[in-house]
Amino acid sequence: MDYRPPSKRDVFDSDLDTLHETVMPWMVPPLKRWFQPLLINEAHYDYDFIEGLEMATRLRAPLDRRNIWGEFEHRLENDPWFGLDAAAYALSRTTIIRTATHTLRFRPAETLDRLLRESGSAWEVTELDIESGKEGEKALILTRRDLAAAKCAILDIRSQHDRPGRFLTDAWKAIASRDPHTNEAYDKAVKAIEAAAQPVVTPKDHKATLGKMISAMRDKPSKWTFALGDLCLIIAMADRVWTEHFRHGTDQRRDDHTLEEAEAALHLAIPLVRFLVGGLVVRVP
């Protein structure tokens, strides 16, 4: 059970009841302890790590080599994003292998995740599959905690239906990190729906777009059944994702998708894919 001070029970407290995007003052001391062995190894600074961090985070003023640790502490205390950017870089240098028969643990990652969770951070340590790597090889990155439920749903879909599941995974990865790619997330959400819908809606047209599938369902809805009645809900959900999408490569995009639009597309794509691959939308023989 999460601890809550008696003085703050039964009342809303912004420090306790919200997830924090940046490093808050109470996170600084444990973060210092976490970073120290990464920067200092057997009384010597790890200059490969330090220089890699400076380049990866584009530090315009590198850490003063006469007082590296003191300046690192100062930045942790005074730049609310520095600690998270540095932690994300540290995780990016590490991969682990986790399969049914083999597990390689990285205890600093577990310690960091516990620190973030207990301090009310909006971020968590996530293991991501590495394409064309070793079996079970995972990358470690920081991702947004508020998308954890979506991640669990996507993993469940992917365990049974790999292709639409991979598109959903890519969409989730594109918006869950510190550097969200909203257009990519939206594109992958659309592709996930298309991959799930094509065998059900247009089994003979492997290149059908989501727009074409929506038109087919709208023109002859009696060809399909949905577990909760007619296809109105399925068509409405799919159509909203499709019509809000910058879908044609020849279009001049005046704006990117917002983060909110990309999240909404993903959250609509997940149940749609579940309905379509789970046999809840069925083509009438």
Image: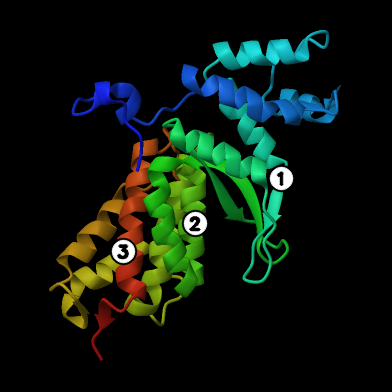
Closer to the N terminus: mark 3 or mark 1? 1
Which amino acid type is marked by label 2?
Thr
Pointers 3 and 1 in contact (C-beta within 8 Å): no
Residue 248 seen from this side: no
Residue behind mark 2: 169
- Which residue does the numbered mark 1 point to in the structure image? 94
Check the picture and name the quadrant holding the C terminus: bottom left
In x, y percent, where is residue 16? 33, 27
Q: CA distance from mark 3 to mark 1?
A: 35 Å
Which amino acid lies under the numbered mark 1 shown in the image of this protein?
A: Thr
- Report if residue 55 is visible in the image: yes
| Mark 1 or mark 2, whichever is nearer to me | 1
100 with respect to 133 (left or right): left
Q: CA distance from mark 3 to mark 2?
A: 15 Å
From the viewer's perspective, is 41 left or right of 266? right
- Mark 3 lies on residue: 272
Q: Kindly indicate the quadrant of the structure image that contains residue 253.
A: top left
Residue positioned 40% across, 46% down in the render: 147
- Above or below, comparing residue 244 to residue 57 in the picture: below
Q: Residue at x 72, y 61 (%)?
A: 133
Q: Residue at x 74, y 30 (%)?
A: 37
Q: Check disc 3 and report its element: helix, strand or loop.
A: helix
Q: Are marks 1 and 2 in contact (CB under 8 Å)?
A: no
Image quarter where the N terminus lies is top left
